[in-house]
Image (spheres, helix red, strand yellow):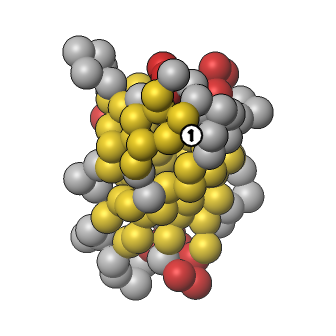
């Protein structure tokens, strides 16, 4: 089992940047494919990005390509989401999620077994 803790959220003006971090517990982090999701008030949770367990592949929601970048550091048991050119519509709670073991990237929330508590990102106009 793995525990996930997100950090790095906050309030930022439109056009600004934030880097979210997700720290994972456990010795098997390097075997988990990791995903980022977000949920805005009154909306369903939506896929943001994912990175394969070995970092070899990444995948993004079409609407976010070019602005968001997912990366991971297996030596530090961490996954990151760099968010640039933020827009008010990016305001949401951002969650990281883990999909074991040695699995490929998935964009559906039901394919992820473990979730963090989320971190709030608010983008002001």
Q: Residue 85 versus residue 103: which sits nearer the camera?
A: 85
User: Which image quarter: residue 121?
Assistant: top left
Locate residue 113, reporting x and y percent.
Answer: 29, 51
Direction from residue 24 to residue 103 in the image, left or right = right
User: Which image quarter: residue 38?
Assistant: top left
Q: Which residue does the image show at 42% across and 77% down from the upper left?
A: 28
Q: Residue 101 versus residue 1: which sits nearer the camera?
A: 1
Q: Residue 92 versus residue 108: which sits nearer the camera?
A: 92
Would residue 80 be seen by someone viewing this image from the given angle? yes
Q: Which residue does the image show at 71% across and 50% down from the upper left?
A: 57
Direction from residue 46 to residue 17 in the image, left or right = right
Q: Which residue does the image show at 53% across and 82% down from the upper left?
A: 76
Q: Which residue does the image show at 64% across and 20% down from the upper left?
A: 63
Locate residue 74, reporting x and y percent.
Answer: 57, 76
Would residue 53 be seen by someone viewing this image from the given angle? no
120 up-or-down from 26: above or below: above
Locate residue 52, reporting x and y percent.
Answer: 60, 55
Locate residue 48, reporting x and y percent.
Answer: 52, 34
Residue extending farthest to the top is 42
């Amino acid at each position: 089992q793995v525990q996930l803790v997100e950090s790095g959220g906050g309030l930022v003006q439109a056009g600004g940047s934030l880097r979210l971090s997700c720290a994972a517990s456990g010795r098997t982090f390097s075997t988990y494919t990791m995903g980022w999701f977000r949920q805005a008030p009154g909306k369903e949770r939506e896929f943001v990005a994912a990175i394969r367990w070995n970092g070899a592949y990444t995948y993004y929601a079409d609407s976010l390509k070019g602005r968001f970048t997912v990366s991971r550091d297996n030596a530090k048991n961490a996954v990151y989401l760099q968010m640039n050119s933020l827009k008010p519509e990016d305001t949401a709670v951002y969650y990281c999620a883990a999909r074991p073991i040695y699995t490929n990237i998935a964009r559906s929330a039901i394919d992820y077994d473990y979730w963090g508590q989320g971190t709030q990102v608010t983008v002001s106009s």
